[in-house]
Structure formats: C-alpha cells, structure tokens
Amino acid sequence: MRASTRREFVAGPAGRIECAVDSPEGVARGVSLVAHPHPLFGGTLDNKVVQTLARAFVELGYEAWRPNFRGVGETEGTHDEGRGELDDLHAVLNFIRRERFILAGFSFGASLVARLAAREKPEWLVLIGVGITRIMAPPVAPGTLVIHGENDDTVPLAAVLDWARPQDLPVVVVPGADHFFHRKLQVIKQIVLANRR
C-alpha cells in the first residue's frame, strides 16, 4: 500500500465515521469497502487482515476504504450489535459508490458486508474468517470468495462449512492458519489476487 493513506470522515446515522483511504496509481477502476472485526474485541480499521485486503484491492486498481465502526478511533456513536454498524457501512458505501464496487470484510465485518451485499449487489464479495458464530451471514451470491483458517478457534471451520454447504459455496481453507492468519497474511493476499476475474 502506498504511503499516501489518508483519513476521510463520512456523515453517518450516529455521527461521523472515520475512514482510512488508500488509492492506486492513476485512475481507480472502482472502489472497495473493507469492514474490520468486532469492535468490542479490539477490531479496528488498522487490523492486519483488513490492511492486507486493502493492499490487494489497491494492487487490483481499486480505491480501498476502511471505516472504523461506532466507538472506535474517531468514529462517533456506540456499539449497536451489528444493526447500526450495518447502517454505517451503507452510509459509507452511498458516499463512495461508483459503478464498480467490491465489498469485503473480516470476521464480524465479513458477516456485515454479506448482509450489505444482499441489498447492494457488489461486483465482488470477499469474506475472510466470516464471523457466523456471532452474527449470522445470509446466503451470498455465487462467485463470492470465502477464505477461512484451518485452525480457526474463534469461528470453527466446521461452522463455516455448515453455512456454505447448502449454498454449494466453495471455501478456500488456508492450512495451519488461525483466526487472525498470523504469518499467513501474504497467503490471503495471493488468494485474493489469484481469484479476481
């Protein structure tokens, strides 16, 4: 990611939403909105998985927006168990929306962007460590990229497979990876880059 990460503030239903924005060289081909893990368990826009996703999208030519959820960093409001956070993601998407947009998220953020995608129909949906044990994700469109760690003890792989199975949805399993993909971030990035059509 270029050193030109900038901060932007978007008006949301509970006040301003702090976002980190990374831009590709030249004209962006579209935008990506990347949602971070659970704010009550240390999730922020600076999470390493979220940063890795943003880097991959920038490399693919998309501007990457990473908002902080309510009560995190300089984002106003208090945690709303996913309801208000979904509204905030919708507000950011409406602010940045272009013809081409990608939705992506990690853990709690993955479940929320799956819900947002049910209403907004992104060009592509990328879910990492989707947090279905804390907030259920709806069925997703074919072509959604789902990546999960083999040794995830926060969201067990078996639970994700149970969610994916009725949808005939493939899940890319990273061998040896835990929930936070320690020492496996480059693997995530390569999977995202390799799967972009």
Image: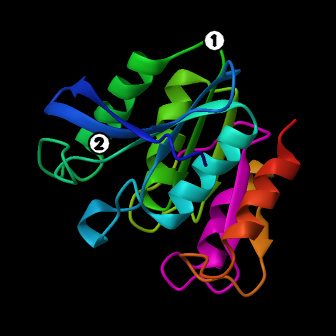
Amino acid on which disc 1 is placed? Glu
Amino acid on which disc 2 is placed? Glu
Quadrant of the rendering where the C terminus is positioned = top right
Task: Say which of marks 2 and 1 sits in front.
Answer: 1
> To which residue does mark 2 refer?
85
Q: Distance between the residues labelled 2 and 1?
A: 23 Å
How far across and how far down the image is residue 169, in percent?
Answer: 78, 52
How far across and how far down the image is residue 83, in percent?
Answer: 27, 42
Which residue is at the front of the view, 13 or 66?
66
Q: Residue 99 carries which label?
A: 1
The residue shown at (77%, 72%) is 173
The residue shown at (69%, 76%) is 184
Is 162 situated above or below 34? below
What color scheme is it? rainbow
Does residue 132 appear in this view? no
Occupied quadrant, residue 117: top right
The residue shown at (52%, 47%) is 3
Q: Residues within 10 Å of mark 1 (few under 14, many from 20)?
A: few
**Is 22 left, or right, of 169 in this rendering?**
left
Toward the front, the furthest residue is 3
Element at label 1: loop
The answer to whether residue 154 is magenta is yes
How far across and how far down the image is residue 187, in percent?
Answer: 76, 69
The answer to whether residue 93 is magenta is no
If you read the primary sequence from the N terminus, does the residue marked by circle 2 or circle 1 appear first? 2
Residue stretch in magenta? 138-164
Is 2 situated above or below 157? above
Occupied quadrant, residue 67: top left
Element at label 2: helix
